């Protein structure tokens, strides 16, 4: 039963975000100056995390955010990013479709040869995540109880607020994702801030629904030093 980590980041700020204008798929708006700073800050925050896969929506603002994150990485600067139009959808079915695709990929069932960088041992994937995220005993307890190996992969996803809200709803309502005790109801229902970071640990097994643990949701402490550019 493979286990993987999924780190999901909302794109950085755009001009429309600043002006509180709803932007859908038809608006391929680039990042604002603040958005580029946010992406760089997210990249600096995540620079020690060794990702094995990277997926982004195919719109400009998510591509730019992904680039801003990877260019700060110590391990993943040359990683090939897969751009997927499903990541720009706000429909729940699309959110489930992409998530199922990732699970099948980790199980080795997609039949696709992924362009990924050589990864470190699974223990290293866990260690670099635990250095910055409150993993606590979410992995170690399960490992000791089940004798299962560590992380098989660490997946980075950059998407949009509406998509993330839809996906989180699916993980929470349909898959009964377990949550940190510190997570408030407001955080569960709120839209992720620009470059908000959420992390999930997922166990997958053929023929069974995935088991999902939320490590953190909409984390934004990396933005403390980022000032809004007017």
Image (cartoon, grey):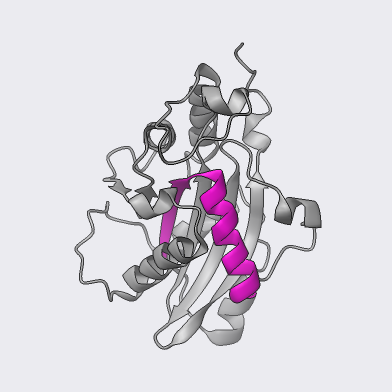
Asked whether residue 47 appears in the rendered view, the answer is yes
Q: Position of residue 201 (x, y in %)?
A: 55, 66
Asked whether residue 177 appears in the rendered view, the answer is no
Read off the magenta span: 153-177
Q: How many marks?
A: 0
Q: Where is residue 174 in the image (x, y as percent from the top left)?
A: 60, 75
Q: Residue at x 72, y 54 (%)?
A: 189
Residue lying farthest to the bottom in this orientation: 207
108 or 27, nearer to the observer: 27
- Left or right: residue 196 compared with residue 77: right
- Left or right: residue 124 compared with residue 58: right
Task: Specify the quadrant that holds the C terminus.
Answer: top right
| Rendering quarter of residue 177 | bottom right
Q: Residue at x 36, y 70 (%)?
A: 106
10 or 216, nearer to the observer: 10
Q: Is residue 160 above or below residue 228?
A: below
Q: Residue at x 65, y 71 (%)?
A: 173
Examine the structure image and report whether residue 160 is included in the region drawn in magenta: yes
Examine the structure image and report whether residue 204 is included in the region drawn in magenta: no
Q: Position of residue 113 (x, y in %)?
A: 19, 63
Q: Residue at x 27, y 55 (%)?
A: 118
90 or 224, nearer to the observer: 90
Residue lying farthest to the top in this orientation: 230
Task: Specify the quadrant that holds the N terminus.
Answer: bottom left
Q: Is residue 208 above or below residue 30?
A: below
47 or 92, nearer to the observer: 92
Q: In this view, does 209 lie above or below 67?
A: below
Q: Where is residue 43 in the image (x, y as percent from the top left)?
A: 48, 35
């Amino acid at each position: 039963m493979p286990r993987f980590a999924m780190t999901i980041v909302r794109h950085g700020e755009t001009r429309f975000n600043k002006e509180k204008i709803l932007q859908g798929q038809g608006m391929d708006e680039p990042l604002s100056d603040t958005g580029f700073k946010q992406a760089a800050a997210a990249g600096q925050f995540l620079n020690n995390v060794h990702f094995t896969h990277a997926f982004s929506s195919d719109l400009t603002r998510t591509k730019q955010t992904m680039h801003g994150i990877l260019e700060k990485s110590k391990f993943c600067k040359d990683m090939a990013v897969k751009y997927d139009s499903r990541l720009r959808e706000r429909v729940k079915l699309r959110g489930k479709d992409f998530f199922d695709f990732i699970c099948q990929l980790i199980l080795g069932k997609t039949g696709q040869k992924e362009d990924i960088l050589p990864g470190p041992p699974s223990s290293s994937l866990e260690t670099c995540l635990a250095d910055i995220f409150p993993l606590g005993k979410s992995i170690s307890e399960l490992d000791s109880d089940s004798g299962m190996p560590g992380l098989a992969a660490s997946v980075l996803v950059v998407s949009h607020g509406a998509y993330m809200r839809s996906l989180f709803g699916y993980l929470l309502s349909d898959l009964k994702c377990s949550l940190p005790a510190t997570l408030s109801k407001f955080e569960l229902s709120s839209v992720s801030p620009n470059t908000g970071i959420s992390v999930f640990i997922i166990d997958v097994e053929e023929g069974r629904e995935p088991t999902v643990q939320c490590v953190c949701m909409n984390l934004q402490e990396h933005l403390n030093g980022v000032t809004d550019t007017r």
